[in-house]
Image: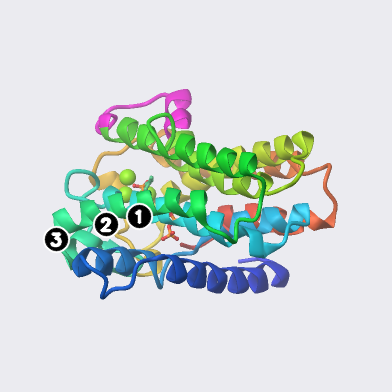
């Protein structure tokens, strides 16, 4: 692993920051209905790489935006991500019993509670974006943030990608079909994580925002390509989720279509395209550059 010390340090700071931001915004475990709030907290707190908040904060660094403005957007995008994981693991979807090194939400609680915990996290994300007082930006920026997360989460984004994923089981997607699915199911939220920080700029610089959006598209796809590679060649303990699940479930993946070497080559090409998108930035975007490399080199 060749992550820079600057990135490792920043990751630690932002992971703590994201944990605190989530903790502060989630209802307490003794708040009625207790079981539901316990399930939401069980899945959202104390685990995960927090890559989406990291991207929001690192984009903020590239744009000179105070991290204090970004705790709300970082927490909101992570809430939608956690909701997507809870539902992804359900028996009707990927039927997984391990997530972030612990039993999945429906195993630790029950299926109905897991469905509702996902629903609750999704609604809370939009509540945070719409009213959190730390998001100190003009109303039109705030509305644009809500729109960005709604588009990324919905049937044209993550949920749409998940639908394509489930309908494609046992089928061979061609490369454009596979890319389309990945861009939606994983890429959309990653792209949104970067956009949310760009939307905290006042006034928004459309040229910079566009470059960052292109960067985010590239890493959104490389992230899922690497996820597919890890599912093939890592192990359950390192991943904190069941290895080999895609093959067992007959999922269309990059390694299935291109082979492992082809998938790795694709990830590298996407990393290079991500770096190209940042060529107009100086050292203020180094964390974003390092994050792109981390995404394709990570071990879990
Ligand atoms: C896993 O996401 C699901 C995908 C979208 C591929 P992450 O690998 O970011 O999971 P956590 O948040 O670190 O657990
Ligand atoms: C999940 O893709 C994408 C979302 C959760 C939206 P995967 O099904 O590959 O994710 P893992 O491998 O279970 O984390
Ligand atoms: Mg899945
Ligand atoms: Mg899955
Ligand atoms: Mg996977």
Q: Which residue is mark 1?
A: 121
Residue at figure coordinates x 70%, y 72% from the top left: 5
Binning the other alpha carbons within 10 Å of mark 3 as few (below 14), some (14 to 19) or many (20 upward) gives few
- Say if disc 1 is inside 8 Å of ligand 2: no
Asked if residue 272 lies left or right of residue 72, the reply is right
Residue at figure coordinates x 17%, y 63% from the top left: 107
Whether label 1 touches label 2, CB < 8 Å: yes
Percent coordinates x, y for residue 257 in the rendering: 41, 33
Q: Secondary structure at mark 2?
A: helix
Binning the other alpha carbons within 10 Å of mark 1 as few (below 14), some (14 to 19) or many (20 upward) gives many
Binning the other alpha carbons within 10 Å of mark 2 as few (below 14), some (14 to 19) or many (20 upward) gives many
Please give the label number shown on residue 271: none
Q: Earlier in the sequence, mark 3 or mark 2?
A: 3
Q: Earlier in the sequence, mark 1 or mark 3?
A: 3
Distance from Cα at disc 1 to Cα at disc 2? 6 Å
Q: Which residue is mark 2?
A: 117
Percent coordinates x, y for residue 101 in the rendering: 33, 70
Q: Quadrant of residue 203?
A: top right
Q: Which residues are magenta?
A: 167-181
In the rendered image, is residue 114 in sight?
A: yes
Q: Secondary structure at mark 1?
A: helix
Q: Which residue is mark 3?
A: 110
Tell whether position 178 is magenta.
yes
Asked if residue 218 lies left or right of residue 121, the reply is right
Of badges 3 and 2, nearer the viewer stands 2
**Viewer-proximal residue, 293 or 161?**
161
Percent coordinates x, y for residue 30 in the rendering: 26, 75
Distance from Cα at disc 3 to Cα at disc 2? 10 Å
Percent coordinates x, y for residue 295 in the rendering: 57, 54
Distance from Cα at disc 1 to Cα at disc 3? 16 Å
Q: Secondary structure at mark 3?
A: loop
């Amino acid at each position: 692993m060749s992550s820079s010390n600057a990135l490792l340090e920043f990751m630690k700071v932002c992971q703590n920051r994201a944990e605190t931001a989530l903790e502060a915004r989630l209802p307490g475990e003794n708040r009625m209905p207790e079981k539901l709030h316990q399930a939401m907290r069980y899945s959202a707190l104390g685990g995960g790489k927090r890559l989406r908040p990291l991207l929001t904060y690192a984009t903020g660094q590239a744009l000179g935006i105070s991290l204090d403005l970004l705790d709300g957007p970082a927490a909101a995008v992570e809430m939608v991500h956690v909701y997507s994981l809870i539902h992804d693991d359900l028996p009707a979807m990927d039927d997984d019993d391990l997530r972030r090194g612990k039993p999945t939400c429906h195993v630790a609680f029950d299926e109905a509670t897991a469905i509702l915990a996902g629903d609750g996290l999704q609604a809370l994300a939009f509540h945070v974006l719409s009213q959190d007082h730390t998001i100190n930006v003009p109303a039109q920026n705030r509305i644009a943030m809500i729109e960005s997360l709604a588009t990324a989460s919905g049937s044209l984004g993550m949920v749409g990608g998940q639908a394509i994923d489930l309908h494609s089981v046992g089928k061979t997607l061609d490369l454009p079909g596979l890319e389309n699915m990945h861009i939606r199911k994983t890429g959309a939220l990653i792209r949104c994580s970067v956009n949310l920080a760009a939307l905290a700029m006042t006034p928004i610089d459309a040229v910079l925002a566009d470059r960052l959006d292109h960067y985010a598209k590239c890493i959104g796809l490389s992230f899922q390509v690497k996820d597919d590679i890890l599912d093939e060649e890592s192990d359950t303990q390192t991943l904190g989720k069941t290895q080999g699940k895609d093959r067992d479930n007959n999922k269309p993946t990059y390694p299935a279509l291109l082979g492992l070497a082809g998938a790795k080559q694709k990830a590298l090409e996407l990393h290079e395209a991500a770096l190209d998108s940042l060529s107009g930035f100086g050292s203020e975007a180094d964390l974003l550059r390092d994050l792109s490399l981390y995404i394709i080199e990570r071990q879990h």
